[in-house]
Image: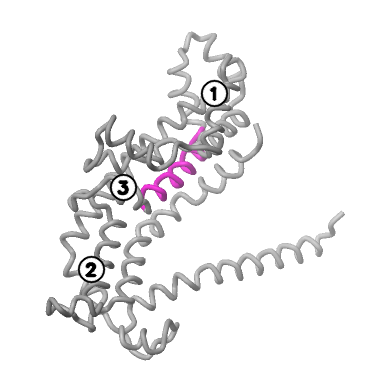
């Protein structure tokens, strides 16, 4: 048995270890923020440093000049993230619910088909042909919502395990005796008891939609449908082109553009909303992952 002193030593060691790992994790993020405020010449000459020799706001001034495009792209990304997350949570929870019910005849078959998608997929070409030729979503907001992320097998199994371990069959049986339908049971009983796991998969899905740029690369060619990630990539490519010698023949070569610091500033802009939102969901996130990861 552990003595009280042993438990205190373990907690002290664990606290020290986790604090050290947290600091190590934060160091690259801090370096990115500092680099975004570093003068381009100093950044190229001396490399990345926590204490740069010269500071500059040129990277952010350049992005401010692109403010109209950035705000519109933020609007697209926020819309896609909200709609995609809500739809994903709805479909995921509704799919996981019958899979968690022991009296559902086809739950093992359904679980197999969901698990199968974790091992194999149709590939990029077939997916592109299906979404563009059959569903016709190219150059529409649905192209950023429907493909790839709407329902993921990992989230489905996470929710299924949560239901199986936290919603007792007697509760459902009592509701059925009172005449409740399956849909009413799902909305009135299952969902209110599933706040931690719903918050967890919401955070997972929101992060995926916020950081996604592949759907925009595959299905979007009109700039008005660019999300923030795709727009930042476009801005970065434009800066690199203007800084390159290949643009000199056009008379637009400009070596003073903050190319490297702009990349860092774009990274800051991209991750800032997630950093602000995460603390409010952290307690649900931890509980949902721990409980939902238990084998059901």
Residue identifier under label 1? 110
Q: Is residue 258 above or below residue 294?
A: below
Mark 2 Cα within 10 Å, few/some/many (few <14, many 20+)?
few
Distance from label 3 to label 1 (Cα)?
30 Å
Q: Which residue is mark 3?
A: 218
User: Given contact means CB atoms under 8 Å apart, are the residues at marks 1 and 2 in contact?
Assistant: no
Q: Tell me the residue at 41%/88% (across/down).
A: 46
Q: Residue at x 29, y 41 (%)?
A: 143
In the rendered image, the vertical position of residue 14 relative to residue 256, given as above or below: above
Measured in 3D between alpha carbons, the distance from the residue under mark 1 to the one under mark 2, in whole angstroms, is 47 Å
Q: Nearer the viewer, mark 3 or mark 1?
A: 3
For label 2, the residue is 238
Q: Position of residue 156 (x, y in %)?
A: 51, 34
Q: Is residue 109 above or below residue 130?
A: above
Side (left or right) of 96 relative to 90: right
Q: Nearer the viewer, residue 114 or 34?
A: 114
Q: Contact (CB < 8 A) between labels 2 and 3? A: no
Q: Which residues are magenta?
A: 194-210
Q: Position of residue 43 (x, y in %)?
A: 36, 84
**Quadrant where the C terminus is found in the figure:** top right
Element type where label 2 sits in the image: helix
Nearer the camera: disc 1 or disc 2: 2
Say whether residue 263 is magenta: no
Q: Could you tell me residue 214's position as x and y percent? A: 35, 50
Predominant secondary structure, magenta span = helix
């Amino acid at each position: 048995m552990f003595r009280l002193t042993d438990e205190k030593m373990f907690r002290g060691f664990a606290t020290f270890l986790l604090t050290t790992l947290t600091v190590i994790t934060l160091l690259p993020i801090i370096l990115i923020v500092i680099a975004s405020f570093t003068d381009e010449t100093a950044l190229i000459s001396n490399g990345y440093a926590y204490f740069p020799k010269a500071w500059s706001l040129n990277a952010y001034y350049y992005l401010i000049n692109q403010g109209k495009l950035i705000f519109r792209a933020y609007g697209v990304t926020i819309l896609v993230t909200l709609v995609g997350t809500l739809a994903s949570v709805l479909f995921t929870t509704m799919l996981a619910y019958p899979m968690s019910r022991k009296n559902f005849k086809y739950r093992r078959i359904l679980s197999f088909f969901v698990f199968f998608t974790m091992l194999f997929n149709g590939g990029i070409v077939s997916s592109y042909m299906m979404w563009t030729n059959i569903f016709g979503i190219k150059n529409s907001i649905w192209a950023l919502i429907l493909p790839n992320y709407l329902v993921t097998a990992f989230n489905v199994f996470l929710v299924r395990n949560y239901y199986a371990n936290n919603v007792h069959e007697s509760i459902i049986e009592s509701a059925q005796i009172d005449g409740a339908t399956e849909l009413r049971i799902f909305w009135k009983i299952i969902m209110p008891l599933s706040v931690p796991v719903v918050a967890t998969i919401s955070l997972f899905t929101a992060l995926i939609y916020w950081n996604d740029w592949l759907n925009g690369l595959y299905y979007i060619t009109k700039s008005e449908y660019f999300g923030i990630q795709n727009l930042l990539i476009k801005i970065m490519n434009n800066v690199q082109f203007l800084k390159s010698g290949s643009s000199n023949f056009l008379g637009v070569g400009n070596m003073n553009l903050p190319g490297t610091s702009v990349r860092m500033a774009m990274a800051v802009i991209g991750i800032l909303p997630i950093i602000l939102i995460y603390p409010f969901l952290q307690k649900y996130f931890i509980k949902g992952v721990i409980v939902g990861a238990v084998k059901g």
